Amino acid sequence: MNYFEIKTDGKAYIRTDSGTVIREVGDGAPVAHADFNHDESMFSITYESGRAEIRNCKNILVRKIADYGVRKVFLKKNYYMVYYIDGSEKNFEY
């Protein structure tokens, strides 16, 4: 099972259980939050600016969720949950 490491400078990495770096993720902007889906084939990434995206395991953009205003995104099996900065939340199907 892989996990995300987000450094204090905002760089995010996917690592194996043993700690080996698989790849750096994102587009270079500081990352605030990242989350895998159930089978680790995709992940959500939320930047400090509030922009959020879904990317595949090769770090290729699959879907842009928002340009601003997002705090976190969690990927579930058939949907994703978006938590906004204003405290609201909403579920969307893939």
Image (cartoon, helix red, strand yellow):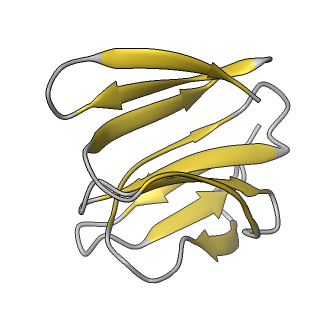
Please state the horizontal and vertical placement of residue 73, each as a whole percent of the image. Answer: 47, 34
In terms of depth relative to the viewer, which is nearer, 24 or 29?
A: 29
Please state the horizontal and vertical placement of residue 70, each as a whole percent of the image. Answer: 31, 42
Determine the residue located farthest toward the bottom in the rendered image: 28
Please state the horizontal and vertical placement of residue 74, each as a whole percent of the image. Answer: 53, 28
Dividing the picture into quadrants, the one containing residue 48 is bottom left
Lateral position of residue 9 relative to residue 72, left or right = left
Lateral position of residue 44 relative to residue 82, left or right = right
Lateral position of residue 24 relative to residue 17, left or right = left
Please state the horizontal and vertical placement of residue 27, each as a whole percent of the image. Answer: 52, 79
Q: Say if residue 76 shows up in the picture.
A: no
Residue in the image at 54% along x and 71% along y: 26
Determine the residue located farthest toward the left in the rendered image: 86
Residue in the image at 25% along x and 45% along y: 69
Residue in the image at 79% along x and 17% along y: 78
Q: Say if residue 68 shows up in the picture.
A: yes
84 up-or-down from 47: above or below? above
Dividing the picture into quadrants, the one containing residue 14 is bottom right
Which quarter shows the N terminus?
Answer: top right
70 up-or-down from 8: above or below? above
Lateral position of residue 14 relative to residue 89, left or right = right
> Total of numbered circles in the picture?
0
In terms of depth relative to the viewer, which is nearer, 35 or 60?
A: 60
Residue in the image at 85% along x and 31% along y: 39
Which quarter shows the C terminus?
Answer: top right
80 up-or-down from 22: above or below? above
